Amino acid sequence: MHFLPEKLDDYVVAHSQEEPELLQQLTRETYQKILQPIMLSGPYQGRVLSMLSKLIRPKSILELGTFTGYATLCLAEGLQKEGEIDTIDVNEELVDFQRKYFDKSGYGSQIQQHLGSAIDILPTLDKTYDLVFIDADKPNYSNYFHLVIDKLNPGGIILSDNVLWHGKVVEPLKDKDISTKAVLDFNTLLRNDDRIETVLLPIRDGLTISRRK
């Protein structure tokens, strides 16, 4: 989703770092073999995630919503040498696809895949995190926040994707539009929770940065 005029958006992309070759390969294969390839973070947002991770230098990362592993690998670029990533997804058919690229990247031994519902898996993860990336099913965004906030270290960061939801957050809400309602509620939750400080960035489909106080 692009909210900038096309020419300006092209300029922004052209003057940002290019994605690594491995991620280009991952993107090509995702579009060739996987349904809904539009779910990929994409090269520009991927470089944003990479830059944020490099600035944060996390020792532990939690990702909700792996898909084909593109964002996982972008976040891994800032991981400390002995750091680890826990990434959760419900799609069993993507596990081998993800693992192939994780192992090609050199970060494979640091990435732990979890298959199943994040609602069920999160309570079983007995650790804390420096960086959390939420990019899964929208109706559970608020539930995910409540499950991860106490696992977030002081000064830790939550990145939340798709928080502008194709621009629907500023349109009249339709009665049966559960996902848009969930995103609206989630954005309000982040704005009002006094445990964090939050800024919403109009990057692609919206990316929120929330810092644990």
Image (spheres, rainbow, N blue to C red):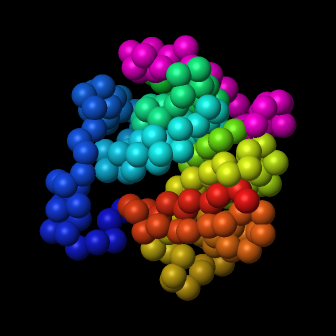
State which region is magenta. Answer: 99-128
Q: Where 99 sits versus 187, above or below?
A: above
Left or right for 110, reference 106? right
Residue 27: x and y in percent read 31, 34
Q: Where 56 sits versus 165, above or below?
A: above
Residue 73: x and y in percent read 44, 31
Toward which corner of the image does residue 183 lie, by quadrant? Answer: bottom right
Residue 173: x and y in percent read 60, 81
Toward which corner of the image does residue 43 lie, by quadrant? Answer: top left
Question: What residue is shown at x 74% (from left), y 74% (from top)?
Answer: 192
Question: What residue is shown at x 65% (from left), y 41% (from top)?
Answer: 130
Q: Is residue 144 in view?
A: no
Question: What residue is shown at x 53% (from left), y 44% (from top)?
Answer: 56
Camera-side residue: 190 or 152? 152
Residue 66: x and y in percent read 54, 36
In the rendered image, the quadrant that contains the N terminus is: bottom left
Residue 11 belongs to the span the image colors magenta: no
Q: Where 153 sits versus 77, above or below?
A: below
Q: Is residue 46 in view?
A: yes
